[in-house]
């Protein structure tokens, strides 16, 4: 897959196809692909021929339908295989088309049609995956606005405003970002104060206060204050554009990944074709008649064809995919299902993955000698915060409602960007906000308040100070809540891989350490930008680990793409993350991750057993044909029998018992 990410970033626009795919019309987008249309036609023709055959219809009718299936599903892989021959490569698709034609030539047209449908469908799924990845990468750029408000000077007075395309902004330009707008370029705040939600870039769960001198990123969401920002990087070099580039680069690398059986297909294919030709030509050189020689060579090609080997691999993996899907894990391909079981190291994002990604009031610390109880402070704080739209305010209000407290209407309300709120409740002035702003210049219990703030922050929480009539009353500790199943999932992953998972987060080291300790993780990489997460994954891979990355946000997408396997949480996952990930946990249950790894390992064991069975059948039949006289019907029966055996063995994984056993194995 090749994407012109840089051009898309400069243009600041998302293609119509990308918007369609990401917006939910993925099937309409997929139908534009010729591989999907031809595979669908081949499947319909095959099913129609099968119905006519089973119903005892005229032979010429179902033969015509099967032959049409051959053409619809086989011409494209056959042509691609011929093109590969020009590059001196024998493609397995061409071999499968040849085997299907060989089957038809001896009357086994149904078996050949089934082979054609399997390979046409596989090619269509690969094409759909490639297109959706391309569309999702382009869709990432849609989080940055197309236009920005550029001002002639950095000063508020007398500045002339003009609306320009983000792509036209130059380094040094000054832009105005009003409350609620997305920031159009990476830059530095020159004037103003606000809170900025930059979870898309850094993964931090809470908005970050920004003031003069602070760095901001394109695509992040401004809060309640206006900001004047100096542009530091052009659109093509912004962090969000670099994220898209990282995803593209990693996707190209992973596109070369193949099933184990595909890695040996070249040698096997060449050997089989060479042996078939030799078996036909050599006897003719010694004067043997053509008809029995051709029949023997055709028998050899049928019994030696890798149909059973292909089905030894695909049914177990596809059955495991179906079983995982019924239990809330969408695995996108057989390659992914095979690779899940090879995981030796898991790297997990914090915000929205190990945690819920929403602020939660964890504690209320009353200062000494205050005339209020904790419930009274919570009711007063929630009443003051109720009119606010800030996420921290929502956490306080939710806690009060959960405690069944009654909120009092405010008589006056003021929200100051980056400072907090001020409200009048029952004649009292209530102030709630950041310690750095509310404790400056105050007396009384300020020293005790600062000490309490330090303790709360040291525990990894965000500290919020409550003042009543100008006196510090309490300090609220707000945290990102750990998922209840996180610790158990981490323990199971440690048992499966033999190593404790690694925490990758853009949040600060103190908060990361607090969450990691609660989850049972000892290895922490904190304050990482998206490219930093990729670097951490590359370092683990360089050490010989097969890395699985689990995440949910746009900032996790490059790491998901770079890992051997990327898993996204579906409930909170962004469009780009869900498209980039190799598997999606639909129900946001972390316990499903060790379960699907265990299921993959069982599927790999079944594949190994099937390969032994298939190889045994092929070896016996080939030797029989070479040193004796293998009747063609018996050869076909043996070949088809091996196919049925390995197919049925693989389909055992369709049962719910397979998932239950995998879950139990992961919990041991």
Image: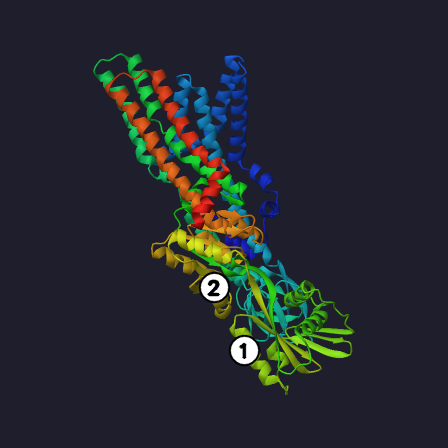
User: Helix or strand or loop: what does disc 1 sit on?
Assistant: helix
User: Where is residue 642, by image quadrant?
Assistant: top left
Choose between 244 and 572: the one closer to the eye.
Answer: 572
Q: Distance from label 2 to label 1 (Cα)?
A: 20 Å
Labels 2 & 1 near each other (Cβ < 8 A): no
The residue located at (34%, 23%) in the rendering is: 303
Choose between 531 and 501: the one closer to the eye.
Answer: 501
Label 2 vs 1, first from the N-terminus: 1
User: Where is residue 347, by image quadrant?
Assistant: bottom left
User: Helix or strand or loop: what does disc 2 sit on?
Assistant: helix
Left or right of 554? Residue 469 is right
Is 350 rendered above or below residue 278?
below
Tell me which colouring the rendered structure shows: rainbow
Q: Is residue 316 visible?
A: yes
Q: Position of residue 463 (x, y in %)?
A: 59, 73
Q: Position of residue 404 (x, y in %)?
A: 70, 64
Q: Position of residue 320 (x, y in %)?
A: 46, 39
Residue linked to disc 1:
454
Residue linked to disc 2:
516
Q: Is residue 1 visible?
A: no
Disc assigned to residue 309: none
């Amino acid at each position: 897959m090749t994407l012109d990410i840089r051009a898309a970033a400069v243009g600041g626009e998302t293609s119509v196809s990308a918007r369609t795919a990401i917006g939910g019309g993925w099937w309409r987008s997929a139908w534009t692909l010729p591989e999907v249309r031809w595979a669908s036609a081949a499947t319909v023709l095959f099913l129609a021929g099968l119905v006519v055959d089973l119903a005892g219809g005229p032979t010429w009718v179902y033969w015509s339908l099967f032959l049409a299936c051959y053409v619809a599903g086989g011409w494209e892989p056959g042509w691609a295989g011929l093109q590969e021959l020009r590059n001196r490569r024998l493609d397995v698709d061409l071999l499968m088309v040849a085997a299907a034609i060989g089957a038809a030539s001896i009357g086994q047209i149904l078996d050949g049609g089934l082979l054609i449908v399997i390979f046409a469908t596989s090619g269509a799924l690969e094409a759909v995956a490639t297109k959706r990845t391309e569309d999702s990468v382009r869709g990432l750029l849609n989080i940055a606005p197309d236009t920005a408000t550029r001002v002639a000077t950095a000063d508020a007075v007398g500045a002339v405003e003009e609306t320009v395309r983000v792509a036209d902004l130059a380094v040094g330009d000054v832009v105005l970002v009003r409350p609620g707008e997305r920031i159009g370029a990476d830059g530095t705040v020159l004037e103003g104060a606000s809170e900025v939600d930059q979870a898309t870039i850094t993964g931090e769960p809470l908005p970050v206060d920004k003031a003069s001198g602070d760095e901001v990123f394109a695509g992040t969401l401004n809060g309640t204050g206006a900001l004047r920002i100096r542009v530091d990087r052009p659109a093509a070099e912004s962090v969000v554009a670099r994220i898209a580039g990282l995803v593209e680069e990693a996707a190209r690398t992973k596109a070369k990944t193949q099933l184990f059986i595909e890695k040996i297909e070249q040698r096997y294919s060449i050997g089989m074709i060479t042996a078939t030709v030799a078996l036909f030509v050599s006897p003719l050189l010694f004067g043997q008649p053509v008809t029995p020689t051709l029949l023997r060579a055709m028998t050899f090609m049928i019994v030696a064809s890798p149909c059973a080997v292909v089905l030894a691999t695909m049914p177990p993996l596809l059955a495991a995919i179906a079983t995982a899907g019924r239990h809330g894990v969408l695995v996108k391909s057989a390659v992914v299902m095979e690779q899940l079981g090879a995981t030796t190291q898991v790297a997990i994002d914090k915000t929205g993955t190990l945690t819920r990604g929403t602020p939660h009031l964890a504690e209320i610390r009353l200062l000494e000698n205050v005339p209020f109880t904790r419930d009274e402070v919570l009711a007063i704080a929630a009443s003051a915060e109720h009119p606010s739209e800030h996420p921290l305010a929502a956490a306080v209000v939710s806690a009060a409602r959960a405690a069944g407290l009654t909120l009092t209407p405010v008589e006056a309300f003021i929200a100051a960007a980056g400072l907090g709120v001020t409200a009048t409740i029952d004649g009292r002035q209530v102030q709630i906000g950041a310690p750095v702003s509310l404790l400056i210049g105050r007396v009384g219990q300020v020293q005790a308040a600062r000490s309490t703030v330090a303790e709360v922050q040291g525990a990894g929480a965000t500290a919020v100070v409550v003042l009543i009539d100008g006196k510090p009353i309490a300090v609220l500790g707000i945290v990102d809540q750990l998922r209840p199943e996180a610790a158990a999932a981490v323990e199971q992953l440690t048992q499966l891989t033999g190593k404790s998972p690694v925490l990758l987060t853009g949040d600060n080291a103190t908060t990361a350490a607090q969450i990691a300790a609660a989850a049972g993780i000892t290895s922490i990489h904190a304050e990482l930008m998206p490219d930093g997460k990729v670097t951490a994954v590359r370092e683990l891979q360089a050490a010989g680990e097969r890395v699985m990355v689990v995440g949910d946000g746009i900032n996790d997408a490059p790491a998901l793409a770079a890992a051997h396997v990327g898993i996204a949480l579906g409930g909170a996952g962004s469009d780009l993350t869900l498209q980039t990930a190799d598997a999606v946990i639909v129900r946001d249950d972390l316990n499903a991750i060790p379960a699907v790894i265990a299921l993959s390992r069982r599927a790999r064991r079944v594949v190994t057993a099937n390969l032994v069975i298939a190889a045994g059948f092929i070896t016996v039949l080939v030797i029989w044909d070479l040193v004796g006289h293998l009747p063609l019907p018996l050869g076909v029966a043996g070949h088809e029998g091996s196919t049925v055996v390995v197919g049925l063995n693989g389909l055992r994984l369709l049962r719910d018992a397979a998932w239950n056993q995998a879950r139990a194995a992961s919990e041991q």
